[in-house]
Amino acid sequence: MTYYVVDDFLSKEDYNNIRDIITGNEFPWYSQNIVTGDDNDNPLEAFFTHYMYSGLGTPMGVRSNFYDACCVPMIKKIGNAILIRIKANCFPRTESLRTHKFHVDHIFPHETCLLSLSSNDGYTLLETGEKIKSVENRALFTKDLLRHASTNCTDLNCRINLNITFIGV
């Protein structure tokens, strides 16, 4: 199987701590004009990110001040891995649900862990047709370059997730 879902992925304490930091007023977000890295993206589909770690295969040298508090519990739970990138994504609410373009996070083989930081009507659409709903503390793991598409949400101010890409060892 090229994906699986784990509900209640983190302990309640770790999850609440990460959620409270990332959704707090002190957490900086940076505007992005392209959701999938495709220059043909709809320019109205802007979103916000915060890179917490960037290593293999991505611009090197990023390590956010929030790395220890937000990333270490996730890394420990994932286990042995070579980290590629860790970033938070924030998709603002719109009147209607919008599905972005299919994409893979990197062009080389890797795995992804996508942690939902709230329950909302957004989801991740897999190229296989499955929709993985955004449920708080739910982790979606994908591998084998499984194409997927993100959405925003309509029932909260925004849909936020934490995206970790890695190579399992």
Image (cartoon, rainbow, N blue to C red):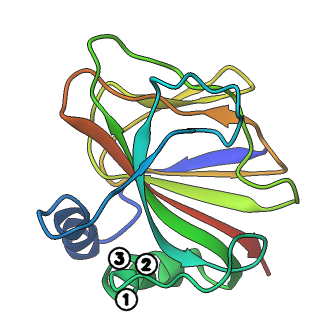
Task: Please tell me the numbered disc located at residue 71.
Answer: 2
Q: Nearer the viewer, residue 8 or 18?
A: 18
- Disc 3 crowd rating (10 Å Cα; few below 14, some 14-19, many 20+) is many
Q: Amino acid at mark 1?
A: Asp
Residue 154 picture location, percent across and down:
26, 21
Residue under the image location 51 percent in, 39 percent down = 33
Q: Is residue 28 left or right of residue 104?
A: left
For the residues labelled 2 and 3, the Cα–Cα distance comes to 4 Å
Residue 50 picture location, percent across and down:
41, 63
Q: Tell me the element at label 2.
A: helix
The residue pinned by badge 3 equals 70
Q: Amino acid at mark 3?
A: Cys
Q: Is residue 133 above or below residue 20?
A: above
Residue 41 picture location, percent across and down:
63, 27
Q: Are discs 2 and 3 less than 8 Å apart at CB?
A: yes
Q: Are discs 1 and 3 less than 8 Å apart at CB?
A: yes
Q: Are discs 2 and 1 less than 8 Å apart at CB?
A: yes
Task: Please tell me the numbered disc located at residue 68.
Answer: 1
